[in-house]
Image (spheres, grey):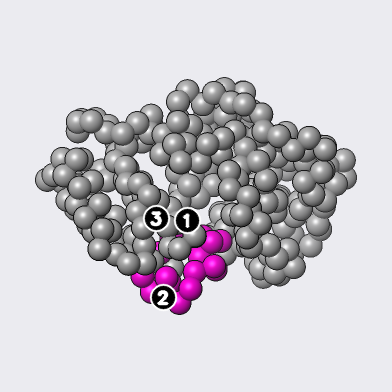
Amino acid sequence: MEIFSNVKEISNIIAAIKAQQFSIGFVPTMGALHKGHLALVEKAMANNDKVFVSVFVNPTQFNNTDDLNKYPRNLEKDIAQLESISKEILVFAPTVHEMYEGNTTAQQFDFDGLENEMEGKFRKGHFNGVGTIVKRLFEIVKPDNAYFGEKDFQQLQIIKKLVEKYHIPVNVVGCKIEREFNGLAMSSRNARLTDSQKREAPFIYKTLKTAKTLFGTKSANQVSKWVNNQFENNKILTLEYFNISEVDSLKEMKRKSENKKYRAFIAVYAGDIRLIDNIALN
């Protein structure tokens, strides 16, 4: 398995791949890989000649320094997991200095308001950091196809908007949420959960599934009230927000329309660990 940390070095490899007219699939990650990441890699491998996986914990998308410091990092373990799929995967694991060239600040973006909803309200500047690093990675790797999980659905929509507004020639592929056997959405942060938190965390997806059922006959306001009530008596999980939003604009739904698609989004704290999830409603 080839591992690169230098932009110039990886750019030379990519130029050689492009010269042979091979297609490039790309899976950007922050490491701490799990089966959800590996599912993205396998999809990329099925549809491209060459596959790159980046492993980079991006500091500019963290609005909480403590969260950045506690974010799990284990490159050796990540590489071993990728090798279990294929030794042909190419890994890009740069340093912060390599990516930001000594200026670790985020570019400012206008994502047509997508950045102001949900996560944007609770994590100021987060999507500027996401946009900065994804744009930089796309410029370096020059992928034909890039793969992102729908667990971060708002991020997925924002990356599609980034590609549209900056005319970046890449096809952004959204992939279904991978879940633990108990329904909990797979996340690198799950590794930090205590035993009692792990036992309680599936309650998040269970609540989303019931909300989806209720959405068939109840208003968005009634469903939201029901969800809030479910968490009021939970001693382990604390609800940060629950939103029912239009898929395209991500704006909170006001009134149901038959020709619009909706999703329910949720953010929950288990101690100081923040977990997000979502579900399609129609």
Q: Amino acid at mark 1?
A: Arg
Q: Which residues are magenta?
A: 184-200
Q: Is residue 191 magenta?
A: yes
Q: Is residue 201 magenta?
A: no
Q: Are marks 2 and 3 in contact (CB under 8 Å)?
A: no
Q: Earlier in the sequence, mark 1 or mark 2?
A: 2
- The dominant secondary structure in magenta is helix
Q: Position of residue 164 (x, y in %)?
A: 55, 25
Q: Are marks 3 and 1 in contact (CB under 8 Å)?
A: yes
Q: 154 or 35, which lies in front?
A: 154
**Secondary structure of residue under mark 3:** strand
Question: Any mark on residue 196, and which?
Answer: 2
Q: Position of residue 259 (x, y in %)?
A: 24, 30
**Secondary structure of residue under mark 1:** strand
Q: Position of residue 265 (x, y in %)?
A: 36, 46
Q: Which residue is mark 1?
A: 274
Q: 272 or 103, which lies in front?
A: 272
Q: Residue at x 70, y 51 (%)?
A: 56
Q: Residue at x 38, y 33 (%)?
A: 250
How far apart marks 1 and 2 lie (CA) works out to 15 Å
Classify residue 91 by image quadrant.
Answer: bottom right
Q: Residue at x 47, y 36 (%)?
A: 120
How many C-alpha atoms fall within 10 Å of the one at disc 3: few (<14), some, or many (≥20)? many
Left or right, residue 136 beside residue 277: right
